[in-house]
Amino acid sequence: MSDFRRFILRIVDVLGVLSIFGGALLFALLGYAVGETTGRISGSVGLGPVYFVLGGFIGFIIFAIPAALMFSLSEIAANTRETLLVVRQSRIGSEGHQIQIAHANEAIADAVPFIDITKELSKEAVEVIRLAKEAGYEVAVSQDRKSVTIRRGRLGASYASNAEILDFGRVKGLIG
């Protein structure tokens, strides 16, 4: 994510926090005014501070809910951009560079679902598939190329990431 985008998101986050406290203060002052007016009309004294606290609480809730939604969307945007950056970086550059990135982000990259299984299988997953074929399993790539089905007889399962294929290999004792 560019520095300018980060800067804008931080400004939005700061304004969100300020709006929560500003809204709470505004509602507290309005609550105090309503409490004093109600007290004068009904003849009760001292309702202003009670309505001040009540108004502040209501204002805080009213302004905190949209701010929480905004903060959530901001966090999702940041996380999505970081994930896409990792995926894009792993697909560009020299092969040596790709291997370095793959090792640095192995836990993330292996768990990412396939976009095209024919281009994204790790060497370890290819080895598991080879060993599964030797052990009598049938292996087939789905039509959309997003998963591989490994079966023996009627029983089988589809695997949509390198991590799932490696787990299959470990469970079946094909790899250590």
Image: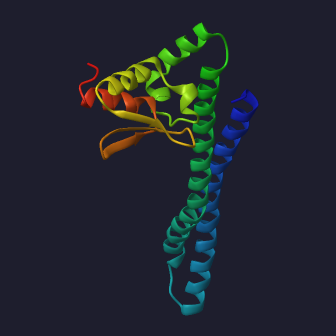
In front: 4, or 151?
A: 151
Which residue: 64% across, 44% down?
Answer: 13
Q: Which residue reaches farthest right?
A: 4
In front: 118, or 124?
A: 118
Percent from the top left, x then y, of residue 102? Answer: 51, 18
- Say left or right for 152 vs 164: left
Res. 131 image quadrant: top left
Placement of the N terminus among the 4 image quadrants: top right
In front: 70, or 148?
A: 148
- Say left or right for 45 vs 13: left
Picture mark count: 0
Q: Where 41 sits versus 112, above or below?
A: below
Percent from the top left, x then y, of residue 130? Answer: 38, 22
Which residue: 29% across, 20% down?
Answer: 175
Percent from the top left, x then y, of residue 27? Answer: 61, 67
Placement of the C terminus among the 4 image quadrants: top left
Which residue: 50% across, 34% down?
Answer: 112
Which residue: 53% across, 32% down?
Answer: 117
Q: Where 73 sits versus 93, above or below?
A: below
Percent from the top left, x then y, of residue 26? Answer: 65, 64
